Image: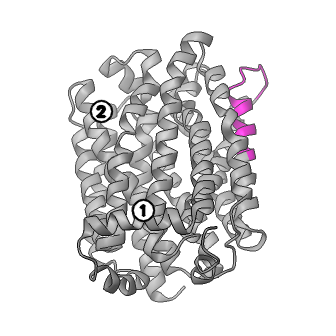
Amino acid sequence: MTSRQAQVFLLVGIAMLFAGYDMNVFGLAAPQIQASLGIPEDKLALTLSFIRIATIFAVMLAWAADLVGRRRLLLITIVGQALATLATGFVQDYNAFVACQILTRVFGYAEEMLCYVVIAEEVAASQRGWSSGTLGALYYMGGGIASLVFAFVTVLPYGWRSLYVIGAVPLFMMAYMRRRLPETQRFEVREKEVEKMRSRLAAALEQTRLISREYPGRLTAMLIAAAAFGFAIWPAEFLWPKYLQSNFGFKPYETTLLIIPGGLLAVAFNILSGRLSDHIGRRITAILGCLMAMIGFAFFYSGLNIPYLPLTWIVAFAGFLLADALIAGLSAELFPTSYRATVSGLRYLTAILAGAISLALEGPLYNVFHTHGIAVLVLMGTMPIAMIALLTLPEPAGRSLEEISGEARHA
């Protein structure tokens, strides 16, 4: 990388590390938060579904990045996430917790969308797969740090609340450092076109209309893949720390002892696979990730009496990490600069809302089967749809963004 590319990657990637910490606390500390705030068992996944309403507002922020710039929005998102995370540590009831977490995710989801956009626009074609994989790895390494702090949840003052206060501190530090983040060169060219439009609202409406007309097939396939993957994966990904503690009998520190080495293996695999996708293609590598996640979680939630069964989480997590990062990267690679943040926002909105619907259904399924494991496995049935949709997308590996987006329209 050039010095500029390295600077951009570090300012974006390190923030993703701390954002990953923030976004994973609820899943890790779910039993403690559940007991503290009086959340019923069949409403736990539904609570996360409520919180994911934030996606709608996050997408609005992401769309604005195609009009006002990536840098300005990334400054807003990290400050907003830091403030909302800090506030979560001081809530006194369930409603306040949900409200603060919605605000946290409005800014956090927008942050994640825009980070992939910035990387796609600033990094060379031969490095985009590695960069997307590493960006996703940093995000979930943040989850590993959260699990390390979570090991001490029973001795920290104020318990789970301290996890959020601790997580807010580095976000404020990164907000200060991000003042040095430059605007992407591709948006600087695009900005001259935006200034000619009558209004930003009109520009946003025009963006949506044009992309639907110029890339209908490509956009539809991307959104189907995102929806099917989000629906299948999020209940499994959210509930596994609770499942470890309630079904496998893991204590908080034992959960951390699995997460740290297992997560490091998954992160290393993700980075190597990102590089591999630069050679064999994004689509095949993403499908491999989907298969790993589906098979790994199928064993993890199966309820079988098999030695070392909790270790199958490592395979599932590695696959989830890989597929999630590459699908996000594809949404940024397959469309021109003028649409890139908009499509990333649509992809994120679709995946999160599909996941929210799936999480809302998990509670009724729990009441039917009386176990989270079977409920999660039923909901994972949409994963093959995601893999089929990925196969229909163009292959961007090794090609310039201009070459990819310059293909025949209506594709």
Tell me where the magenta segment starts and ends, as one range: 291-307
Q: Is residue 318 above or below residue 102?
A: below
Residue beneath disc 2? 98
In the displayed structure image, the side of residue 179 where residue 14 appears, left or right: right
26 drawn magenta: no
The quadrant of the rendering that contains the N terminus is bottom right
What's the coloring here? one colour
Q: What distance separates the C-alpha of mark 2 from that of mark 1?
A: 31 Å
- Of pointers 2 and 1, the one earlier in the residue sequence: 2
> Which image quarter is the C terminus in?
bottom right
Question: Is label 2 in a helix, a strand or a loop?
Answer: helix
Picture quadrant of residue 92: top left
In depth, the one of 316 and 172 nearer the eye is 316
Q: Nearer the viewer, residue 394 or 33?
A: 394
Residue of label 1? 208
Q: Secondary structure at mark 1?
A: helix
- Can residue 74 be seen here? The reply is no
Q: Is residue 381 visible?
A: yes
Q: Tell me what residue is drawn at x 28 percent, y 63 percent.
A: 173
- On the image, the x and y values in percent for residue 26 come to 41, 36
Towards the viewer: 276 or 248: 276
Vertical order, 184 against 80 (above or below) = below
Give 93 or 161, whichever is nearer the viewer: 93
Q: Residue at x 65, y 52 (%)?
A: 266
The kind of residue tagged 2 is Val
Residue at 55% over, 38% down: 234
Q: Amino acid at mark 1?
A: Thr
Q: Residues within 10 Å of mark 1 (few under 14, many from 20)?
A: some
Residue 296 lies in the magenta-colored region: yes
Query: Residue at position x 42%, y 62% from top?
Result: 208
Single out the mark in the foreground, 2 or 1.
1
